């Protein structure tokens, strides 16, 4: 029997998600929730609705997938779905990052599941790698490029000498940037992702005084050219470090040379280096933004969601602390 699922959102990621789910025989789409019903879409009218609550409450729908950029609405949908003990799969990094302890509490209280692999690193399977594959590892540092738009802009400025504003418009046209791109260029988006990485790895959020960040808004074509003349590149690097019982997050435009694996991560790609005490550095890289790569991560969550017990943070966390 097909499993009925609900979709919320039909923007860049939502559209790709809808098309990818249609290609999977085991699922049936019960409804697609959109904000602007009047817009013409490639979805049958019978599936479209503006009322997410009816879909979430449908007793035949056990899994809801959401990709919208309204963090407050996304949190309400997540809360309602989790209070029914259902599965909520989200790509909304701002919503996830802003509500991690509360969402975790809802998961534990009502027995539902919350999966958000798509919220960090697009197609890169980073959260599951931290949670499951590195479950017993002493993770000491996670360092990476987690914003596709900024990396795209810096790459275009460096390789093609186009200016910041033009490169940003391209990132928007290609569907990499947020609807308000200041979230990308002022590094809010990287900050949300760093918080999600930290919570997944360490089961906690750093207090605000241990977070520093700076975006790429003030990086000029001259800065980028100077770096290139010295054999380096400027990348927006997020650095999460563990120091005994606490950890810090530092995000800033950084000059790096070819010996750093992140130097080779260009355009909208993301790269993450997870440093474990016993593993040494583990490098993950791939498409960090865009409809299809992000939707693919959500589908991975969808397929894996019914598997056994699910923990939002590393299972062995208590054992290793
Ligand atoms: N705006 C985000 C980025 C989308 O550019 O990385 C993917 O989270």
Image (cartoon, rainbow, N blue to C red):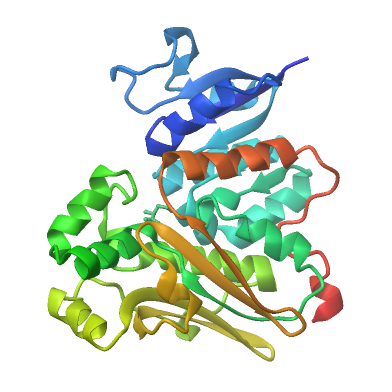
Is the residue 180 above or below the residue 253 in the image? above
Q: Position of residue 32 (x, y in %)?
A: 49, 22
Can residue 306 be seen in the rendering of this structure? yes
Q: Position of residue 112 (x, y in %)?
A: 74, 42
Is the residue 240 above or below the residue 23 in the image? below
The quadrant in which the N terminus is found is top right
Q: Residue at x 47, y 79 (%)?
A: 208
Q: Residue at x 51, y 46 (%)?
A: 91
Residue 15 as seen in the image, left or right of residue 142: left
Is the residue 166 above or below the residue 42 in the image? below
Q: Residue at x 19, y 85 (%)?
A: 226
| Quarter of the view holding residue 321 | bottom right
Residue 243 as seen in the image, left or right of residue 45: right
Can residue 52 be seen in the rendering of this structure? no
Is the residue 270 above or below the residue 81 in the image? below
Q: Position of residue 225 (x, y in %)?
A: 18, 79
Residue 227 as seen in the image, left or right of residue 301: left
Q: Nearer the viewer, residue 158 or 33?
A: 158
Q: Residue at x 23, y 70 (%)?
A: 158
Residue 277 as seen in the image, left or right of residue 93: right
Q: How many marks?
A: 0
Q: Position of residue 40 (x, y in %)?
A: 30, 17
Q: Nearer the viewer, residue 117 or 244?
A: 117
Where on the image, by quarter, is ligand 1? Answer: bottom left
| Quarter of the view holding residue 203 | bottom right
């Amino acid at each position: 029997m097909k499993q009925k699922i609900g979709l919320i959102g039909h923007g860049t990621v939502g559209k790709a998600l809808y098309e990818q789910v249609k290609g999977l025989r085991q699922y049936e789409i019960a409804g697609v929730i959109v904000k602007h019903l009047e817009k013409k879409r490639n979805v049958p009218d019978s599936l479209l609705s503006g009322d997410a609550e009816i879909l979430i409450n449908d007793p035949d729908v056990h899994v809801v997938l959401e990709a919208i950029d309204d963090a407050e609405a996304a949190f309400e949908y997540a809360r309602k779905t989790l209070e029914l003990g259902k599965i909520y799969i989200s790509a909304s990094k701002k919503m996830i990052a802003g509500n991690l302890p509360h969402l975790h509490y809802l998961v534990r209280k009502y027995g539902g599941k919350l999966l958000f692999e798509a919220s960090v690193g697009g197609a890169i399977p980073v959260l599951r790698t931290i949670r499951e594959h590195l479950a017993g590892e002493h993770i000491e540092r996670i360092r990476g490029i987690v914003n596709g738009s900024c990396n795209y802009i810096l790459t275009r400025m460096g390789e093609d000498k186009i200016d910041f504003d033009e490169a940003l418009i391209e990132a928007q046209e290609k569907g990499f940037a947020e609807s308000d791109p200041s979230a990308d260029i002022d590094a809010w988006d990287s900050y949300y992702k760093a918080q999600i990485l930290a919570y997944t790895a360490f089961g906690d959020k750093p207090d605000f005084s241990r977070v520093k960040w700076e975006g790429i808004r003030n990086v000029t074509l001259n800065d980028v050219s100077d770096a290139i003349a010295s054999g380096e590149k400027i990348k927006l690097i997020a650095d999460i470090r563990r120091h005994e019982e606490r950890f810090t997050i530092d995000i800033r435009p950084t000059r790096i040379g070819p010996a750093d694996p992140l130097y080779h991560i260009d355009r909208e790609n993301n790269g993450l280096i997870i440093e474990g005490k016993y593993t040494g550095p583990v490098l993950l890289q791939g498409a960090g933004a865009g409809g299809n790569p992000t939707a693919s991560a959500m589908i991975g969550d969808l397929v894996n969601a019914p598997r056994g017990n699910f923990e939002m943070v590393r299972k062995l966390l208590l054992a290793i602390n």
